[in-house]
Amino acid sequence: MKPNFTLRLRVFNLNCWGIPYLSKHRADRVKRLGDFLNMESFDLALLEEVWSEQDFQYLRQKLLPTYPAAHYFRSGIIGSGLCVFSKHPIQEFTQHVFTLNGYPYMIHHCDWFCGKAVGLLVLHLSGLVLNAYVTHLHAEYNRQKDTYLAHRVAQAWELAQFIQAELMREEFLPHHLGSSSHTSKKADVVLLCGDLNLHPKDLGCRLLKEWTGLHDAYLETRDFKGSEEGCTMVPKNCYVKHQELGPFPLGIRIDYVLYKAVSGLYIFCKTFKTTTGHDPYSGPPFSDHEALMATLCVRHSPPQHNPSPTHGPAESSPLTSVLREAWAEVDQGMAQAHWWATMAGYAVGLGLLLLALLCALAAGGWIREAALLLWTPSVGLVLGAGAFYLFHVQEAKGLCRTRAELQHVLGRAREAQDLGPESQPALLLGQQERERAEEQ
Amino acid sequence: MKPNFTLRLRVFNLNCWGIPYLSKHRADRVKRLGDFLNMESFDLALLEEVWSEQDFQYLRQKLLPTYPAAHYFRSGIIGSGLCVFSKHPIQEFTQHVFTLNGYPYMIHHCDWFCGKAVGLLVLHLSGLVLNAYVTHLHAEYNRQKDTYLAHRVAQAWELAQFIQAELMREEFLPHHLGSSSHTSKKADVVLLCGDLNLHPKDLGCRLLKEWTGLHDAYLETRDFKGSEEGCTMVPKNCYVKHQELGPFPLGIRIDYVLYKAVSGLYIFCKTFKTTTGHDPYSGPPFSDHEALMATLCVRHSPPQHNPSPTHGPAESSPLTSVLREAWAEVDQGMAQAHWWATMAGYAVGLGLLLLALLCALAAGGWIREAALLLWTPSVGLVLGAGAFYLFHVQEAKGLCRTRAELQHVLGRAREAQDLGPESQPALLLGQQERERAEEQ
C-alpha cells in the first residue's frame, strides 16, 4: 500500500432468514437480494442463515460476474448457514465449529443441529492481508430465563480465541515452497460480521470486544443512516413478530460489523447504513433482520493517529472484570450441566428397575399385556436418559474447558497487575526482548 | 537467545494405556511413571490415554516439585486423554477437537466418545516461543479393511491446518495492554508429540509431514537407542497381544516426536530413545506403547545450515500428489457416508411402515400380543435409523468441508505450478512485496 493510499472496503452483512418451507417469500427475497448485491458490487457480502445449499448455489451463479469468489461453510447436520461472496480472490478459508451449541433434544430450537460456527476468509487487498470472519451464535429464545446463556458466553469466548489465534497465520504452501523461511503473514486488518444474538451490553459481546479489541462500526462511524439506535430487528419489518422483540418494542441490535487494524494502520468506518424494515428500494424486506452496509477505510497511520484507541493499564480492569463475569457464568452453567447429568443418571436407574419389574411380571404371566405395553416406554426411558446423561457429561466437559481457559488468562492478568501498573505495558511488549537478554 | 547459545530441550512422550478397570496394573504403572518422570526431570512430558482425570490429578500432585505446570485437555464425553507436564510456565493453552472421529454406534471402539483432539501449549524458553502440540488420532482396528481411514486422513489434515494456523499467535492480553501494536509473536519452534495411529508411510502421516514441514526425530537423529526400527508397539512388551500387530510381527511405529524451527534457527535431534518392551530399569513396561525420549537442540542457524532441508520447485510434486491422494480418500469416504445416510433413510421408512401395520393389527384385535411385542423393535428401528441417518449426514458434511479445503489448496498449488517452476519460490515469498508495489 502506498504511503498516502486509502484502501476502501465496502461490506454487506445480512442474516437471510432462509429456512426452507418455513421462511416466508424465501425465493423472492433471495432473488431480490442477488439483484441488489449485483448492483451494489460490494467488496464482500457475508450472509448468515442461508440454510439451503440450493440458495447458495443460486446466488453463486447469479453473483458470479460481480463476485467471482464464494464459499459455503458446511458443518453439523443442517449446516452453519454461513456463506460469503467476494469480489476479490479468496486466498484461504477455514472454519471453527463451536464446541457447545445448545441441546439436541430442544428440537424446536434446532440450533444444535446446525453446527453453529465461525468461518474465516483470508484476502489480499492492495498489499494488505484481510482476515474476514462471518459468524452466527446460538439464538436467544427467552431473555428472562435464558437456558443458553452459558453456551453463548462459551461461544463468544471461542470466537474471540479463534480470531486472536488466527490473526497471524502461516501462509499457504509453507513447506512446499521450500526452506523454513515460511512466507508467514500477519493479518493487517480483521473484520468480523454476523448475527451474534447478543445485545451490545451483553456479557458475550463485551467479552468478545474486550478480548479482541474489535471496534463496533455503528458506534465508531460519524455517518450513520438507518434504523433507530442501529437496531437490526425492528418492529417496522413485516416479518418481525412483536412478541419476538419482547421488552424491546423499538427493536434490538444483534447484528454487527466489527473491525480492527494492526499497528501502523488506521481503520475507520466512513459510512454505516442499515435497512429500515424495507429493502433499500422501499420494497418488502430482504429478511426479518436488517442488512448492514459499511464502508471501511484503511490508511497508514500518522503518528498522532493511533489505529485503535489505546487502553493503558488504568483501563485494564474492564477486561479482568468481564473475564471474571464470564468465568462465573460458565461455572454456573457447569453446575447446571452436572445437575442434569446426575438427574439423568437417576432416570436410567429407574428405567432399568422398571424394565426388570416388567420382565418379571411378563414372565410370571401377570398382567402380561400391560407389561408388554409398558416395555417400549421403559426401554425408551433407559435409552433416552442414557443419551441425555452422555450429552450433559459432554456439555460439562466443554464448559470446564472454557472455564479453565478463562481461569488461566485471569491468572495471567492478575500477575500482570501485581507487577504494578507502570510495568504493565512493557510486560509483554518487551517480554521477548527481556528474555532474549536473560542469562540461561 | 545469545548468538552462540544452544537451547536443549528434553522431551518425553507416552501413550499411557490408562483405561480405568480395563488396562492391567494401571495404578502401579502410573506410580512408576511418576517416579521416572520426577527422576529424569524432562522439560516436557506429553502423555496420551490418561483417560481418568484422577490419574492426572495423582500425577500432578506427584510431579508438582519437578513440573510446576500441567494441563489436562478436556473434551467429548470421556475426554481426550491428553495431558502435559512442564518444567517451565505455560503461557497459553488451547485445543482443537477433531470434527470427525469415528461412529457413536461403534461402542466397542469407543473413539467417538473420547472427543479426540490436539492440545497446544505455548512456552517461552530462553527468549524463544515454543508451540508444543500433543495429539492422539483415531485408532486403526483393521488395517485390511479400515473403515476409519477417511476420518483419520481428515484428522491428519485438521491437525496440520491447526499447526499451521497456530504457528503464529496473537499474544495474551493483546487489547488489554493497550494500543493495537499487539505483542504478536511467532512460534520459533514447533514440537508435535503423540500417538498418530499412523505408520510412517501412511497417507495421513505423509500429508501431515508434507503440509507442515515437520521432521521426524527418529529419522533425523544420529544417536538412536531403542527398539528395532524405532517401533513403539513391540512384541516383547508383555501388554501387547500378538494379534494386535497383525502383519507386522516385529512391531509398528505409530508414536512420534516431530519438530521444526523457523528461519534463522536450526533444530536437530541430538539423541532419541525408546523403551524396548520394559521400563527404563528393565522392569515391567509403563504401557502397551513404548515411551519416546528425545533431546532436541535449537541454535542460531549459520548461513550454510538451512534449518530444514529446502524443498525447491522440483520437489513440489510430493505435496500435490499427497494432497490429491488425500482428496480421493476423503471423496470416497464422502460417497460412503452418503450411501449410509440413504440406507438409513430407507430403514426409517420401513420402520414407519411396520409401525403403521402393527397399529392397524393391534387396533383390529389381530395377533394383539405379537403386535405389542413388535412395537418396541419397530420404534427402535425408526429412532435408531433416524439417529444413524443424522449422524451420516453430519459425517458427509464434515468430509465435504475437508474435501473443499483440499481442493482449494490443490487449486492454488496448480496455479503456482502453471506459473512455471522458476517463479514458484518467489510466488508467495514475494507476493506481499509485489502487491505493495502494485498500482491500485
Image (spheres, coloured by chain):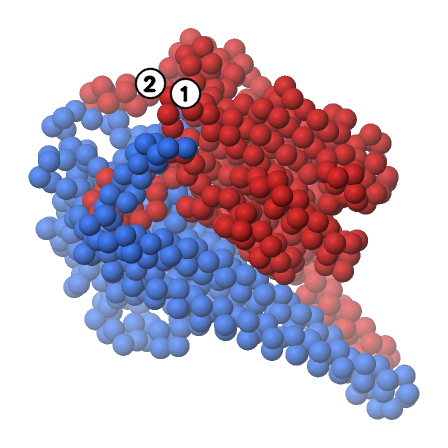
Chain colours: A red, B blue
Q: Position of residue A103 (x, y in %)?
A: 68, 52
Q: Residue furthest right?
A: B364
B191 or A264, nearer to the observer: A264
* Residue displayed at 50% across by 72% down: B335
Label 1 vs label 2: CA separation? Answer: 30 Å
* Residue displayed at 57% across by 67% down: B392
> What is the quadrant of residue A386 in the picture?
bottom right
The crowd level at tag 1 (other Cα within 10 Å; few <14, some 14-19, many 20+) is: few
B156 or A83, nearer to the observer: A83
Residue that badge 1 annotates: A4
Q: Report the side of A91 relative to A119 (left or right).
A: left
Note whether A233 is above or below A75 in the view shown.
above
Q: Is residue A332 visible?
A: no
Q: Chain of mark 2?
A: A
Q: Report the side of A426 relative to A113 (left or right).
A: left
Note whether B371 is above or below A15 in the view shown.
below
Label 1 sits on a secondary structure element that is loop
Q: Report the side of B279 relative to A34 (left or right).
A: left
The crowd level at tag 2 (other Cα within 10 Å; few <14, some 14-19, many 20+) is: some
Instruction: Give amino acid for label 1.
Output: Asn
Q: Is residue A369 visible?
A: yes
Q: Position of residue B56 (x, y in %)?
A: 42, 45
Instruction: Give amino acid for label 2.
Output: Gly
Residue that badge 2 annotates: A430
Label 2 sits on a secondary structure element that is loop
Number of numbered tags placed on the structure image: 2
* Residue displayed at 63% across by 61% down: A54
B336 or A382, nearer to the observer: B336
Tags 1 and 2 both on a single chain: yes
Q: Position of residue B13 (x, y in %)?
A: 29, 49
> What is the quadrant of residue A326 in the picture?
top right
Tell which circle, 1 or 2, labels the residue nearer the N-terminal end.
Answer: 1
